[in-house]
Amino acid sequence: MGAVTTAPTHRSSRLDPAMPRFLAALTAVLLAVVALPPTASAQNVTWGVRPADNDLGADRPNFTYSVAPGAVLSDALTVTNHEQRALTFGVYAADAFTTSSGQLDLRPAGETPTGAGSWVRFDSPTVTVPSGQTVAVPFTVTVPADATPGDHSGGVVTSLRVEAESGITVERRLGARMHLRVAGTLTPSLEIRGTEVEFDGTPNPVGRGTARVTYTVVNSGNVRLNARHSVRIEGLFGLFGTDAAVEPLPELLPGESVTRTVTAPLLPAGRAAATVTATPTVAGGSELAAVTGIGSDVALPWATVVCLLLVLCLVLALRAQARARAAEQQRRIDDAVAAALKRKS
């Protein structure tokens, strides 16, 4: 650094025109290196959250309440800072929803809650947690007087803005789910809608095609539901039946749905019929009656049909050719007989 700053004083006034640009660029680089934030450590910031231990429970995995319309209750979220410096988090409540992949998630901070998330109020939108310390963040839940019976889900979230390696600031979130069951008539209901079957044949006349089944599982009731389900695929008259491999269904919130597609090999037997069966269970409750969805598609062995048609065409052509030869032979015989009779006369 000393050589860079003092060397020009020993030179003549006729400097190399490129030198000022070089010095400016070098200075900018050095300043940038000094000013860079520790982005790598920022990305690895760790903290933890969980429901506080209090009169409402201890060692709770999430916030679960049974409430009446108009009820007001107080609780707290504990936030633990595992870093060597104090951290300031944003705190807010959000509605829960089921993602397209079937996972339960919470809405982002910029989305105004309209469900259970709107029932929660924090005293402050931020909380500062000293290094290595745990802080309880109190909040109040106010259930609307006109809240509908059944399950309402949301969560409380801590957020921290960190700078990624690309220089873009991103928001990291960590929260705890909140499930409230409002007193009243509970109407658990699960439906399987839009069951569709598509059969893709095979060019192999004796091979198996693929049956593709798409269906939507809908929680049409007012309580959270889990469900075991299966997909049975069969040919005409129940021939060549097989069970498709299925992924477990996620817990479904009231009004939420998840769409799945499964496949299974099937011999073409005129028809591909699928029966989707789901047995729901109320979250934290009893098992309900199974529900089904049915769909079908034509599953003709087109390769076999084409082969049979070709064979049939060949047989018909050979028969026609044989008839033509027989007719020609008969014509020649008739001509010979006629010629012989003519000579005798």
Image (spheres, rainbow, N blue to C red):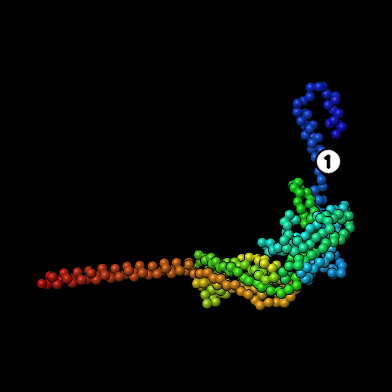
Q: In which quarter of the image is the N terminus?
A: top right
Does residue 23 show up?
yes
Above or below, 131 against 198 in this view is above
Q: Where is residue 62 in the image (x, y as percent from the top left)?
A: 79, 66
Residue type, label 1: Val
Q: Camera-side residue: 244 or 338?
A: 244
When asked about the image quadrant of residue 248, the answer is bottom right
How many other residues sit within 10 Å of disc 1, few (<14), some (14-19) or many (≥20)?
few
Instruction: Give the residue pinned by disc 1.
Output: 34
Q: Where is residue 324 in the image (x, y as percent from the top left)?
A: 29, 68
At horizontal 74% and vertical 65% (from top left) the residue drawn is 153
203 with respect to 317 (left or right): right
Q: Quadrant of the C terminus?
A: bottom left
Above or below, 270 against 92 in this view is below
Q: Where is residue 297 in the image (x, y as percent from the top left)?
A: 53, 69
Q: Position of residue 172 (x, y in %)?
A: 77, 55
At horizontal 82% and vertical 47% (from top left) the residue drawn is 38
Q: Camera-side residue: 117 or 47?
A: 117
Which residue appears farthest toward the left when viewing the image?
345
Q: Camera-side residue: 190 or 15?
A: 190
Asked which secondary structure carries label 1, the reply is helix
Does residue 105 show up?
no
At horizontal 77% and vertical 71% (from top left) the residue drawn is 68
Q: Camera-side residue: 34 or 147?
A: 147
338 with respect to 28 (left or right): left
When asked about the image quadrant of residue 107, the answer is bottom right
At horizontal 73% and vertical 73% (from top left) the residue drawn is 184
What is the count of numbered marks? 1
When asked about the image quadrant of residue 15, the answer is top right
